[in-house]
Amino acid sequence: MRFSVVFFLCFFIVLSSRDFILFSRSQDKIVKNKKDNLKYAIVRITDGRQAIGSGSLVALKNGRAYILSSNHVIRDIKEITLELFSEKSYPNVNFRLVNALPINSSIDSDLALLSVPYKRSDALTFISISSKKPAIEKGFSASSIGCSDLSPPTLEKVTVLSRKLLENPLSGSAFYWQMKSTSRPGRSGGPLINVDEELIGVCSGNQGKFGYFTHLDEIHRFLKSEKMDWLIGWQLPKNGH
Protein backbone atom coordinates (compact mmCIF):
# COMPACT_ATOMS: atom_id res chain seq x y z
CA MET A 1 0.00 0.00 0.00
CA ARG A 2 1.50 3.34 -1.04
CA PHE A 3 0.73 6.69 0.47
CA SER A 4 1.62 10.19 -0.57
CA VAL A 5 4.32 12.28 1.06
CA VAL A 6 1.58 14.47 2.48
CA PHE A 7 0.04 11.51 4.28
CA PHE A 8 3.24 10.60 6.06
CA LEU A 9 3.99 14.14 7.11
CA CYS A 10 0.52 14.23 8.66
CA PHE A 11 0.62 10.66 9.89
CA PHE A 12 3.42 11.27 12.36
CA ILE A 13 2.02 14.48 13.87
CA VAL A 14 -1.70 13.84 13.81
CA LEU A 15 -2.00 12.86 17.47
CA SER A 16 0.12 15.62 18.92
CA SER A 17 -1.95 17.42 21.53
CA ARG A 18 -0.87 20.72 19.98
CA ASP A 19 -3.15 20.00 17.02
CA PHE A 20 -6.12 18.38 18.74
CA ILE A 21 -8.70 20.88 17.45
CA LEU A 22 -8.25 19.46 13.93
CA PHE A 23 -9.62 16.05 14.76
CA SER A 24 -12.92 14.65 15.95
CA ARG A 25 -13.19 12.61 19.16
CA SER A 26 -12.84 8.83 18.92
CA GLN A 27 -15.87 6.62 19.35
CA ASP A 28 -13.89 4.22 21.57
CA LYS A 29 -15.51 3.61 24.95
CA ILE A 30 -13.69 4.10 28.23
CA VAL A 31 -13.82 0.90 30.24
CA LYS A 32 -12.96 -0.07 33.80
CA ASN A 33 -11.68 -3.54 34.62
CA LYS A 34 -8.55 -5.16 36.00
CA LYS A 35 -6.53 -3.75 33.09
CA ASP A 36 -7.47 -0.27 34.28
CA ASN A 37 -4.58 -0.38 36.76
CA LEU A 38 -2.20 -0.44 33.80
CA LYS A 39 -2.93 3.24 33.25
CA TYR A 40 -0.48 3.92 36.09
CA ALA A 41 2.26 2.54 33.82
CA ILE A 42 1.58 5.38 31.38
CA VAL A 43 3.60 8.58 31.49
CA ARG A 44 2.39 11.89 30.13
CA ILE A 45 5.21 13.37 28.07
CA THR A 46 5.66 17.14 28.23
CA ASP A 47 8.17 19.75 27.09
CA GLY A 48 8.10 21.28 30.57
CA ARG A 49 5.20 23.57 29.69
CA GLN A 50 2.51 21.52 27.96
CA ALA A 51 1.64 17.88 27.45
CA ILE A 52 2.59 16.43 24.06
CA GLY A 53 1.84 12.72 24.17
CA SER A 54 2.08 9.43 26.06
CA GLY A 55 4.57 6.66 26.78
CA SER A 56 4.75 3.27 28.51
CA LEU A 57 6.99 2.31 31.40
CA VAL A 58 8.46 -0.98 30.20
CA ALA A 59 11.46 -1.67 32.46
CA LEU A 60 13.65 -0.59 35.36
CA LYS A 61 17.34 -1.51 35.42
CA ASN A 62 20.46 -0.16 37.15
CA GLY A 63 18.66 2.90 38.48
CA ARG A 64 17.09 3.89 35.16
CA ALA A 65 13.49 3.60 33.98
CA TYR A 66 12.80 2.82 30.32
CA ILE A 67 9.88 4.26 28.37
CA LEU A 68 8.57 3.24 24.94
CA SER A 69 6.81 5.96 22.95
CA SER A 70 6.48 7.38 19.42
CA ASN A 71 9.19 9.19 17.53
CA HIS A 72 6.95 12.07 16.49
CA VAL A 73 6.03 12.75 20.13
CA ILE A 74 9.56 13.45 21.30
CA ARG A 75 11.46 14.51 18.18
CA ASP A 76 11.09 18.28 18.69
CA ILE A 77 11.35 18.39 22.49
CA LYS A 78 14.64 19.76 23.83
CA GLU A 79 14.00 18.85 27.46
CA ILE A 80 11.66 15.90 28.00
CA THR A 81 9.67 15.80 31.24
CA LEU A 82 7.63 12.78 32.28
CA GLU A 83 4.53 13.02 34.47
CA LEU A 84 3.65 9.87 36.42
CA PHE A 85 0.40 8.89 38.12
CA SER A 86 -0.48 6.49 40.91
CA GLU A 87 -3.68 4.97 42.24
CA LYS A 88 -3.54 7.33 45.19
CA SER A 89 -2.81 10.50 43.21
CA TYR A 90 -5.02 9.88 40.14
CA PRO A 91 -6.25 11.98 38.35
CA ASN A 92 -3.52 14.29 39.65
CA VAL A 93 0.17 13.86 38.85
CA ASN A 94 2.06 11.90 41.50
CA PHE A 95 5.51 13.22 40.54
CA ARG A 96 7.63 14.34 37.58
CA LEU A 97 10.89 13.06 36.14
CA VAL A 98 12.96 15.58 34.19
CA ASN A 99 15.65 15.29 31.54
CA ALA A 100 14.55 11.99 30.04
CA LEU A 101 16.95 11.03 27.25
CA PRO A 102 16.14 9.38 23.90
CA ILE A 103 18.17 6.18 23.46
CA ASN A 104 17.04 5.67 19.90
CA SER A 105 14.18 6.45 17.54
CA SER A 106 12.84 5.31 14.18
CA ILE A 107 11.05 7.41 11.58
CA ASP A 108 9.81 4.40 9.59
CA SER A 109 8.12 2.64 12.52
CA ASP A 110 7.50 5.86 14.50
CA LEU A 111 9.08 4.50 17.68
CA ALA A 112 11.23 6.05 20.39
CA LEU A 113 12.91 4.57 23.45
CA LEU A 114 13.66 6.86 26.39
CA SER A 115 15.45 6.39 29.69
CA VAL A 116 15.51 8.49 32.84
CA PRO A 117 17.26 8.12 36.22
CA TYR A 118 14.92 6.71 38.84
CA LYS A 119 16.01 6.51 42.46
CA ARG A 120 12.74 7.22 44.23
CA SER A 121 11.13 4.81 46.65
CA ASP A 122 7.71 5.08 44.96
CA ALA A 123 6.55 1.79 43.47
CA LEU A 124 6.11 1.89 39.70
CA THR A 125 3.71 0.02 37.44
CA PHE A 126 5.09 -1.50 34.23
CA ILE A 127 3.66 -2.93 31.01
CA SER A 128 5.46 -5.94 29.61
CA ILE A 129 6.24 -5.95 25.88
CA SER A 130 4.84 -9.20 24.51
CA SER A 131 7.45 -11.72 23.44
CA LYS A 132 4.96 -13.80 21.49
CA LYS A 133 3.79 -13.31 17.93
CA PRO A 134 0.07 -12.45 18.00
CA ALA A 135 -2.06 -15.53 17.36
CA ILE A 136 -4.67 -13.39 15.60
CA GLU A 137 -3.73 -10.68 13.09
CA LYS A 138 -7.15 -9.23 12.33
CA GLY A 139 -10.62 -8.67 13.73
CA PHE A 140 -9.93 -8.79 17.47
CA SER A 141 -10.61 -6.67 20.53
CA ALA A 142 -7.86 -4.99 22.52
CA SER A 143 -7.31 -2.02 24.84
CA SER A 144 -5.43 1.23 24.36
CA ILE A 145 -4.14 3.58 27.05
CA GLY A 146 -3.15 7.21 26.61
CA CYS A 147 -3.51 10.81 27.71
CA SER A 148 -6.35 12.12 25.54
CA ASP A 149 -6.43 15.90 24.99
CA LEU A 150 -3.94 16.67 27.80
CA SER A 151 -5.90 14.59 30.33
CA PRO A 152 -4.61 11.87 32.71
CA PRO A 153 -4.25 8.41 31.11
CA THR A 154 -7.40 6.41 30.43
CA LEU A 155 -8.00 2.89 29.17
CA GLU A 156 -10.29 2.41 26.18
CA LYS A 157 -11.72 -0.61 24.40
CA VAL A 158 -10.66 -0.73 20.73
CA THR A 159 -11.01 -3.04 17.73
CA VAL A 160 -8.07 -4.10 15.56
CA LEU A 161 -9.00 -4.60 11.90
CA SER A 162 -5.79 -5.96 10.40
CA ARG A 163 -2.02 -5.77 9.98
CA LYS A 164 -0.98 -3.29 7.28
CA LEU A 165 2.31 -2.50 5.57
CA LEU A 166 2.64 1.25 5.14
CA GLU A 167 5.34 2.66 2.89
CA ASN A 168 6.98 6.03 3.43
CA PRO A 169 8.26 7.50 0.14
CA LEU A 170 10.89 9.47 2.09
CA SER A 171 12.44 6.50 3.89
CA GLY A 172 11.17 2.92 4.20
CA SER A 173 8.15 0.83 5.14
CA ALA A 174 6.80 -0.64 8.37
CA PHE A 175 3.92 -2.75 9.64
CA TYR A 176 1.07 -1.17 11.60
CA TRP A 177 -2.13 -2.29 13.23
CA GLN A 178 -5.09 -0.70 11.43
CA MET A 179 -7.83 0.19 13.91
CA LYS A 180 -11.59 0.41 13.42
CA SER A 181 -11.66 4.00 14.73
CA THR A 182 -9.30 6.93 15.16
CA SER A 183 -7.46 7.85 18.35
CA ARG A 184 -7.69 11.18 20.10
CA PRO A 185 -4.74 13.59 20.14
CA GLY A 186 -2.46 13.12 23.13
CA ARG A 187 -2.69 9.30 22.98
CA SER A 188 0.29 9.05 20.62
CA GLY A 189 2.99 6.87 22.14
CA GLY A 190 0.52 5.01 24.34
CA PRO A 191 0.25 1.21 24.19
CA LEU A 192 -2.08 -1.27 22.54
CA ILE A 193 -2.76 -4.03 25.09
CA ASN A 194 -3.80 -7.63 24.40
CA VAL A 195 -5.97 -9.89 26.58
CA ASP A 196 -2.84 -11.00 28.47
CA GLU A 197 -2.20 -7.36 29.50
CA GLU A 198 0.91 -7.18 27.30
CA LEU A 199 1.99 -4.41 24.95
CA ILE A 200 1.54 -5.35 21.28
CA GLY A 201 1.53 -1.90 19.64
CA VAL A 202 2.24 1.81 20.04
CA CYS A 203 -0.25 4.51 19.04
CA SER A 204 1.05 6.41 16.02
CA GLY A 205 -1.55 8.31 14.00
CA ASN A 206 -4.76 8.54 12.00
CA GLN A 207 -5.56 8.38 8.32
CA GLY A 208 -9.14 9.12 7.34
CA LYS A 209 -11.47 7.09 9.56
CA PHE A 210 -8.74 4.67 10.70
CA GLY A 211 -6.22 4.82 13.49
CA TYR A 212 -2.80 3.15 13.34
CA PHE A 213 -0.55 1.55 15.96
CA THR A 214 3.00 0.44 15.28
CA HIS A 215 2.91 -3.38 15.06
CA LEU A 216 4.64 -5.65 17.59
CA ASP A 217 6.94 -7.00 14.84
CA GLU A 218 8.34 -3.50 14.35
CA ILE A 219 8.78 -3.02 18.10
CA HIS A 220 10.83 -6.24 18.31
CA ARG A 221 12.88 -5.26 15.27
CA PHE A 222 13.51 -1.78 16.67
CA LEU A 223 14.69 -3.07 20.06
CA LYS A 224 16.85 -5.85 18.61
CA SER A 225 18.59 -3.40 16.27
CA GLU A 226 19.79 -1.44 19.29
CA LYS A 227 20.64 -4.53 21.35
CA MET A 228 17.83 -3.60 23.72
CA ASP A 229 15.86 -6.81 23.16
CA TRP A 230 16.22 -7.62 26.88
CA LEU A 231 13.24 -5.25 27.21
CA ILE A 232 11.02 -7.76 25.38
CA GLY A 233 9.01 -9.67 27.95
CA TRP A 234 10.70 -7.84 30.86
CA GLN A 235 8.84 -8.05 34.17
CA LEU A 236 9.60 -6.45 37.50
CA PRO A 237 11.46 -8.97 39.74
CA LYS A 238 9.68 -10.04 42.89
CA ASN A 239 12.14 -8.03 45.02
CA GLY A 240 11.20 -4.92 43.02
CA HIS A 241 14.72 -4.25 41.67
Image: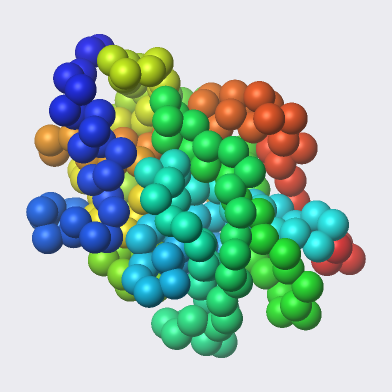
- Decide which of 133, 165 is in the foreground and name it: 165
In this image, 237 relative to 190: left or right? right
Residue in view at x 30 percent, y 39 percent:
12
Q: Quadrant of residue 138?
A: top left
Q: Farthest residue in the top direction?
A: 1
Q: Is residue 192 visible?
A: no
Q: Is residue 37 above or below residue 228?
A: below
Please provide percent x and percent y for residue 65: 70, 59
Q: Quadrant of residue 225?
A: top right
Closer to us: 45 or 38:
45
Please give the name of the residue rendered at 40% of the width and 16% of the height, measured from the top-left corner.
Answer: 172
Q: Nearer the viewer, residue 61 or 201?
A: 61
Query: Can the viewer see residue 89 in this picture?
Result: yes
Tell me the quadrant of the picture where the N terminus can be found: top left
Q: Quadrant of the C terminus?
A: bottom right
Residue 121 shown left or right of residue 209 in the figure = right
